[in-house]
Image (cartoon, rainbow, N blue to C red):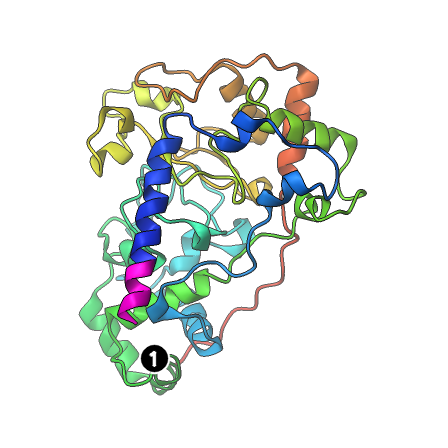
Amino acid sequence: MIQNLIKHRFIQSILGLACIISAFNVNVASAKNSYVFEAGHPSLQEWLLPETPPFPPENEPTAARIALGKALFFDPRLSGSGNMSCATCHSPMFGWSDGLKTARGAQSAVLERASPTVVNTAYNFLQMWDGRKPTLEAQALGPLETTAEMHSNFDQMLTLLNEKAGYIKMFNAAYPKEPIDKTTLAKAIASYERTIISRDSRFDQWVRGDKSALSKQEVLGFEIFASSEKGNCAVCHSAPNFNDNGFHNIGLASFASKKSDVGRFSQRPLGLMKGAFKTPTIRDIELTAPYFHDGSAENLLTVVEHYARGGDTQINLSPNMKKLSLSKKDKEALVAFMKSLTTKPQPVTFPELPL
């Protein structure tokens, strides 16, 4: 067990180093410029996600853990007011986000940042817009512990969980001989979140060899997306999850404000990190408008236009940002390609909560 944990932490450290390198515009795939844009071509296989996302050795997913995590994810009684759950901000109806410009917290207070989707967060090695949580388990507790978000009363919540026969049975099945506490609560929610996966989009089907899965316009969009000379998108939205686990200041207009959100700088006070935010996956991006951490882009074309301009605020701009020479046809192709990254949503049944 200890050896597995050391190995897991070592891998996290190596991948964290890779994130830092990515911030300095190092992208091996783009440098090689070796993609052949044909369905099923071997050069494209790096874009396919592994079927099973990584997980810590002490929290291997099981059916019992996933079922418990799902109940907790949808249970509003975990919040201080008893009227909001994890699913309030991360709803399957809105691509596991909330469809709002920025999130709403306790007593419907308007928060500064948008609710990021939880789709494919299982493949990330840092969580939240500023990367302040290293694991899904830590992230699961974040909104519960935050006064501005769910503002949970843990003593009251844990008393409730320890008094409900249904929850006691579920915790015993999921984590036998472990107490019902913050640790098992976080592990269960994380186990459920690791099932929220997008890896069977039309793009994935095309990469696996289905020639009919993408249109000519969508293939053109991918070519522009992957080209360092055209879209330059893959420098940050890289294979296989269309993100680099890195942080970048992309020149949003809101950063020019005197009270601008400094993003990753609050966790890592390095000059390059001021105003930098985590690169989100763009898998299922069609379902999660509006876009950016401040919700300032209403649609995907607005996103493309922002990058084509090279950003709106040049203060502390990421070195990966540059003006792009894109025609109307190019921009439309990019939008079409991004829409091909949507995996057909599966029906989500709401759990029956222990009373």
**Residues drawn in magenta:** 1-7
304 over 338 or under it: above or below: above
Depth order, front residue of 271/26: 26
Depth order, front residue of 229/146: 229
From this viewpoint, is residue 140 visible? Answer: no
174 over 272 or under it: above or below: below
Q: Which residue is mark 1?
A: 175
95 over 232 or under it: above or below: below
State the image quarter where residue 229 is shown.
top right
Q: Name the image quarter holding the N terminus.
A: bottom left
The residue under the point 38% across, 65% down is: 189
The residue under the point 31% across, 37% down is: 112
Give the image location of residue 14, x and y in percent.
34, 46
The verdict on residue 6 being magenta is yes
**Tag 1: Cα neighbours inside 10 Å, few (<14), some, or many (≥20)?**
some
Give the image location of residue 200, x and y in percent.
64, 52
The verdict on residue 162 being magenta is no
Give the image location of residue 271, x and y in percent.
23, 24
The residue under the point 36% across, 64% down is: 56
| Predominant SS along the magenta part | helix
For this view, does 246 lie left or right of residue 335? left
- The residue lying furthest to the right in this view is 212
Give the image location of residue 38, x and y in percent.
74, 36
Q: Name the image quarter holding the C terminus.
A: bottom left
Amino acid carrying mark 1 in the image:
Tyr
For this view, does 238 lie left or right of residue 177? right
